[in-house]
Amino acid sequence: MTLPKAFSAWISIPFFLVLSCTFQATAQTVVPLYPDKIPNAINGPDEETNKDQVIRKVSKPTLTVFLPPVATANGSAVIVCPGGGYGVLVMEWEGYRIAKELNQSGIAAIILKYRLPDEKIMKDKSIGPLQDAQQAIKTVRERAKEWKIDPAKIGIMGFSAGGHLAATAGTHYDSTFISNPEKTSLRPDFMILVYPVISLMDKIGHKGSSSNLLGSSPTTEKVKYFSNELQVKKTTPPAFLTHAGDDTVVPVSNSIKFYEALNANGVPADMHIYSKGEHGYPKTPELSEWFGRCLHWMQVNQFLPSK
């Protein structure tokens, strides 16, 4: 499998490896996502590969938990879903460096290494990533006391196809795809969506993500089910969206359509569109620019304390 075009422009930048080595050393814990049997799984060899923090063929999902210093922790937590077209996970650019920024703002960061859709390891590959996102929310909420997290301030963040997964978790939380005997809420309290894939419809959908998740000839019903602009309701969590108008990989209309659906249902949302940025924000806007706006939105919506 070759790396999707969306990420080829920037994954080779050398400082990513340096940042990875320095920051990963501070990771407090890596835990299996499922304590027992992985749902919807087909037994097979573990073929996962990791080259320069671009991971392929994930069959054993994990959570990597980064907790901020006790003195600066504010109780908020964000589950981070790296992107990669549902074909790879770009763990450095859309995982570890984001966890560092979250921790510096007093926010607990939990990176989700989710299963990548594959008929070899899943009975139904369309729901595999969503199962992992729901299990991540469930786990963080059930371990909130242990990790000193406010169970009412648990958000989910996603980039590109990871943004699709985060938006799917936010719009499909009332359909349970995992074992949940404690009836723990699977609804994220907020969503942070960065140049996200939202729709799988022909006109604006990202064909690579759709093909990897649903196959080459999905039913119309399934395409609509996973086109999240069609699944918004009044109880959908608040959202922060950012995108570039010159994104030729995932059209900005994905974010616009989702914002319009949120707004029509009275769901609080911010949307920040940059004229230049391309897909992945390789040069502009800088992380401090869009992330600063995200922190402001979290403060306004009381997911972070006001300064």
Image (tube, rainbow, N blue to C red):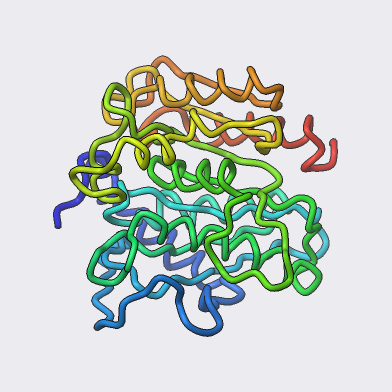
User: Is residue 307 shown above or below 284?
Assistant: below
Q: Residue at x 84, y 42 (%)?
A: 305
Q: Residue at x 56, y 71 (%)?
A: 27
Q: Could you say which is closer to the camera, residue 18 or residue 126? A: 126
Residue 160 seen in the current view: yes
Q: Whole-percent x and y of residue 304? A: 79, 42
Q: Could you say which is closer to the camera, residue 229 or residue 75? A: 229
The quarter holding residue 280 reads: top left
User: Is residue 206 shown above or below 180?
Assistant: above
User: Is residue 101 shown above or below 200?
Assistant: below
Q: Whole-percent x and y of residue 162? A: 43, 47
Q: Whole-percent x and y of residue 89? A: 35, 56
Q: Is residue 86 left or right of residue 103?
A: left
On-image quarter of the N terminus: bottom left
Residue 73 seen in the current view: no
User: Is residue 256 shown above or below 224?
Assistant: above
Q: Residue at x 39, y 32 (%)?
A: 199
Q: Is residue 60 left or right of residue 88?
A: right
Q: Whole-percent x and y of residue 234? A: 69, 30
